[in-house]
Image: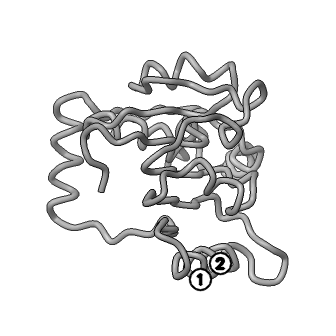
């Protein structure tokens, strides 16, 4: 859980998950930093991010800032490198689905759990079972206008393959919708 005043870094802040995460963390009172392309910086700021880092111009792992929570939707750097941007008792949530050829993303999940045994930092895969309370909180955020979806593109069902190709580029702004 994110607490008011915590520093939260969201890598891939302009994507489908990241755009929601920026809004939710902001609504919880966190100081939010979003990592995205320069072209998406204005969008991420409009979603509530206090700070925006252009991943092409600055390496968030090489900065002096440390974060209480990092949600990494891109995973372009090894866990050991990203952990340097965490506070000593911070939480890293890898969430890209990337992984090795043999185990796929499960390899990163296993590695995160094993590393967590030897450090105060928590490495938790992005998995969740929503509770009634969580859904009520989300509904309240939607009703109040604090949580709105960012829609990148809308495709008809017969163009679903095109939608998947677009998502596979890794450069969507918000969600891609397929209508039925």
Q: Please say if 81 is above or below 162.
A: below
Taking the spot 48% from the left edge, 57% from the top edge, the residue there is: 88
Q: Nearer the viewer, residue 175 or 146?
A: 146
Q: Please say if 50 is above or below 60.
A: above
User: Residue 126 in the image: x percent, y percent?
Assistant: 48, 64
Q: How is the image coloured?
A: one colour
Residue identifier under label 1: 114
Q: In the visual, does 122 lie left or right of 145?
A: right
Q: Are marks 2 and 1 in contact (CB under 8 Å)?
A: yes
Q: Mark 1 falls on what kind of element?
A: helix
Q: In the visual, does 122 lie left or right of 64?
A: left
Q: Please say if 83 is above or below 5.
A: below
Residue identifier under label 2: 111
Furthest-right residue in this view: 101
Q: Mark 2 falls on what kind of element?
A: helix
Residue 90 at least partly seen: yes
**Quadrant of the image containing the N terminus:** bottom left
Taking the spot 64% from the left edge, 32% from the top edge, the residue there is: 36
Q: Nearer the viewer, residue 67 or 157?
A: 67
Q: Quadrant of residue 75?
A: bottom right
User: Residue 66 in the image: x percent, y percent?
Assistant: 52, 42
Taking the spot 68% from the left edge, 73% from the top edge, the residue there is: 105
User: Residue 24 in the image: x percent, y percent?
Assistant: 33, 41
C-alpha separation, residue under disc 2 versus residue under disc 1: 5 Å
What is the total number of numbered labels drawn onto the structure image? 2
User: Residue 35 in the image: x percent, y percent?
Assistant: 60, 34
Q: Nearer the viewer, residue 141 or 108?
A: 108
Disc 2 packing (10 Å; few <14; some 14–19; many ≥20): few
Disc 1 packing (10 Å; few <14; some 14–19; many ≥20): few
């Amino acid at each position: 859980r994110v607490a008011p005043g915590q520093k939260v870094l969201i890598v891939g802040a302009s994507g489908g998950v990241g755009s929601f995460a920026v809004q939710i963390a902001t609504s919880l009172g966190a100081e939010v930093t979003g990592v995205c392309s320069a072209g998406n910086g204005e969008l991420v700021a409009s979603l509530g991010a206090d700070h925006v880092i252009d991943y092409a111009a600055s390496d968030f792992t090489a900065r002096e800032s440390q974060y209480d929570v990092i949600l990494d939707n891109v995973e372009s750097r090894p866990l050991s490198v990203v952990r340097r941007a965490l506070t000593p008792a911070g939480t890293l949530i890898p969430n890209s689905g990337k992984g090795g050829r043999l185990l796929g993303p499960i390899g990163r999940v296993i590695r995160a759990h094993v590393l967590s045994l030897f450090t105060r930092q928590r490495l938790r895969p992005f998995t969740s079972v929503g509770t009634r309370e969580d859904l009520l909180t989300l509904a309240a955020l939607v009703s109040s206008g604090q949580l709105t979806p960012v829609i990148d593109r809308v495709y008809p069902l017969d163009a679903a393959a095109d939608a998947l190709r677009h998502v596979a580029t890794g450069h969507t702004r918000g969600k891609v919708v397929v209508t039925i």
